[in-house]
Image: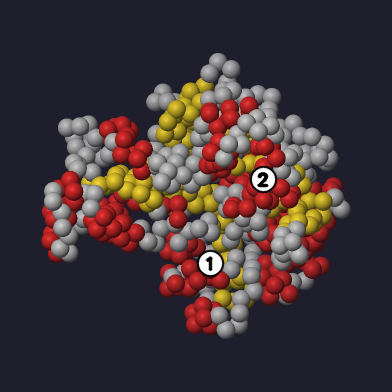
Amino acid sequence: MPEPLITNTLVSLFSRRVAESGDAPALWVKAATADHAGQRAYSALTWNELGEMVRRAAAALHGFGIRPGDRVAQVSENRLEWIVLDLAVHLVRGVHVAIHSELSGPQIAWQLCDVDGRLALVSDAQQLAKLAAVRDQLPADLAVYSFDPLASDSSVAAEQHLLVGTWSDLLARADENLGWLIEDTAQRAVGADDLATILYSSGTTGEPKGVMLTHGNLTSNAAGMVLAFEREAYDLRLSWLPLSHIFARTCDLYAWLVRGSEMALAESRETVLADCAQARPTYLNGVPYFFDKLARHLQTSGQADVPGRLLELLGGRVRICCSGGASLADSTAEFYRQRGVLLVQGYGLTESSPVISVSTPQVNRLGTVGQPLAGIAVRIAPDGEVLTRGPHVMPGYWRQPDATAAAICDGWLSTGDLGEIDADGFLKITGRKKELIVTSAGKNVAPTMIESRLSEEPLIAQAMIVGEGRSHLTALIVPNLDALRAEIIAQRISVISPADALRHPQVLALYAAHIQSRLSDLSHSEQIGRFTLLDRPFSLEQDELTPTLKLRRSVIAEHFATEIEQMYRVE
């Protein structure tokens, strides 16, 4: 197994890895079509083959007109082309803007305009349709290409005149010899402080902020993760988390380049266990929701105590699983340990590239998120907030100097989380200072933005979003009783009392429709799974509101704990 490469740019990391590992297997991808047994089989690309693809893509981007500093956007699910484009953008010294594929059209358009995107690559017709629906909100000179071939008579392409061509069209015009020259120039020209990517992260008000990460940010963090874990001679990771999120980007994609191991791309997030059975990984990153769901499946199916069953479901060779993106329950980690699968957790955020601390097979303590990576400093502010400083800290937010100044002071990044450090240097996260919900799937959601939208609905007087550490969002809704009474009369809904009105199927359906309408242009992770209509408002007298009438979330959650738990009960 090749030794880890320590370098300060993604360009030199990629180039040296290809040069050193050459014809060794690098990336396992599934065939486009199923075999006679109905399965899409895995086959491997070597590092040399991957290198050829990336250099050709870099030449295509250069031929299109991408120059140093230009922003190239990608709206796509995980696939081979995602990785090739990412690495090619670095070779042409562009800035990769990785946009989450589950976002709505207006959200994608906002990000494309904010970065003045010149070129956008989308995965398929579904993503193209999102952009076509908001074409008047897109940059005027934006060119859109699709990875998947689309029918020439596609209504989206023909009627909206949005699609310029396909990925294969772009590659067909590439001068392959130019790719070598581009790579050679980039190795000499790109530095650790050069901007590599912009990733958008929702703030507490819901206004997206573009997190700028440099080559040095990303390579130092990936190398730190690799050095924190002792690897066996053979190592294969299965990558299934969205590469548009920094967790998978650093801890799967770039750590794979540092280590020179093998990586298999999962077919989708819904096929992880089937992909584990085929690829048989030795290492698996994931979010708490996945690990908890698998544990609950074994428990409810009566297989929890079947010897070796958990390991078998993960492919039979997994030595370690690492959880990130949200808080992992101690009981889940203990469930895996008792069944011979080590499950540890790390901690970080997009602004820190992302890893700040991590538990390892050698150094871990239940109830903590491990110790800081080498070269990373962590301290606790007087108010309990976790602060961090080191090569992993972003230079700032894209075009938001005030937000940058608020987040970073004298090199110390304010995480917005509350924590403690014990005598042995283990970090424990005790709460959140900023109002940002992180679901069990690792999705960051700004509750105030959603609550503001809901409160614009005449039928709703107050709303509080719930979902921290949960699989989906729910809402506590305080009805506007006057508006509700008028609606009940107008629709001739038969109710016998105010309490009956709050449980009446027609009233609940009415609220469900209005909630869905108010949130229709938000992403899937920002939608409301369930809601409860409350029989009283949040009040100052109950200490549920601040003097400025902001929600005291912890107090409200305590007062309505029964209603909240009811919304998360399995039907």
Residue 210, above or below 224: below
Q: Can see residue 291?
A: no
Say what secondary structure mark 2 lies in: helix
Check the image and name the residue furthest to the front.
Answer: 302
Q: Which residue is mark 2?
A: 252
Question: Label 2 neighbourhood size at 10 Å, few (<14), some (14-19), many (20+)?
Answer: many
x, y (%) of residue 432?
42, 34
Q: Looking at the rendered structure, which numbered label has been put on residue 220?
A: none
Could you tell me which residue is drawn at 32 percent across and 48 percent down?
Answer: 531
Image location (x, y in percent) of residue 427: 54, 25
Question: From the image, which quarter does the N terminus lie in?
Answer: top right
Quadrant of the rendered structure where residue 309 is? top right
Circle 1 is placed at which residue position? 127
Q: Residues within 10 Å of mark 1 (few under 14, many from 20)?
A: many
- Colour convention: secondary structure
The foreground one among 278 and 264 is: 278
Identify the residue at image location x=41%, y=52%. Answer: 526
**In the image, residue 323 above or below residue 27:** above
Looking at the rendered structure, the secondary structure element under dot 1 is: helix
- Amino acid type for the residue under numbered disc 1: Gln
**Residue 540 shows in the view:** yes
Q: Where does residue 236 sit, x and y in percent of width and height?
A: 75, 44
Kindly identify the residue that appears in the image at 23 percent across and 46 percent down. Answer: 478
The amino acid on which the numbered mark 2 sits, given as a three-letter code, is: Asp
Instruction: Compare marks 1 and 2 and give the one earlier in the sequence.
Output: 1
| 567 on left or right of 278 | left
Q: CA distance from mark 1 to mark 2?
A: 24 Å
The x, y position of residue 5, in whole percent, is 77, 41
Please give the name of the residue rendered at 67% of the width and 42% of the height, measured from the top-left corner. 313
- Judge from the rendering whether residue 226 lies leftward or rightward of residue 465; answer left or right: right
Residue that protrudes farthest toward the top in the picture: 423
